[in-house]
Amino acid sequence: MNRQPIMNRPGEAGDDGGSGARAARSEPDIDAKTAVPDEPIAGYGQQQIALAIERTYAAWVRTGLASVASGVAARELIAPAVPPRMAAIMASLLVLFGCFCFVAGVWCELALNRPPLPKHFRLVPPAMLIAANIVMIAVGAMALIGIWYSRS
């Protein structure tokens, strides 16, 4: 199969008839059927894996923050409809689940094996992840104290 860059195929609009009027591009040749470069980009797979691990961490943190906020809101919104102790228990379960998500996010981030990354690819230092999650767990603990010792 004769593989030519898409821009230089004969018979297409903008064809110069092979006179060489258009400069050849330095882009890799692309198969028209699959639109996949002939040569893979160096380090692309490792970067995608690293970014997937970062997205997983972000998902754990996002779920944890939403759960803590839902627990605080649930305490105030469902308290008139159910006994106060039941509202506090349900809200506490949501907040505790949020704290679990913070711990699980850090654990997944640090426990997953990353492939070697290119030098220009920078990650968040593990100490910073742990410190940020300790702060979020402290916020969850304060929410628990507020849930159990609020006056409503």
Image (spheres, helix red, strand yellow):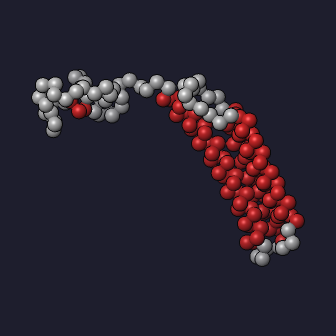
In the rendered image, the vertical position of residue 22 relative to residue 56, given as above or below: above
| 7 versus 66 height, above or below | above
| Up-down relation of residue 152 to residue 139 (above or below) | below
142 in relation to 151, above or below: above
Residue 91 quadrant: bottom right
Position of residue 20 in the picture relative to residue 39 (left or right): left
Identified at 71% across, 34% down, the residue is: 126
- Is residue 100 visible in this depiction of the protein? no
Q: Residue at x 70, y 52 (%)?
A: 64
Choose top left, top right, bottom left or bottom right for residue 3.
Answer: top left
Q: Is residue 152 left or right of residue 55?
A: right
For the point 74% across and 35% down, the residue is 127
How many marks are shown on the rendered structure? Answer: 0
Q: Nearer the viewer, residue 84 or 37?
A: 37
Q: Residue furthest bottom?
A: 80
Q: Name the spot of residue 39 as percent of width and height, x first.
A: 38, 23
Q: Is residue 81 left or right of residue 122?
A: right
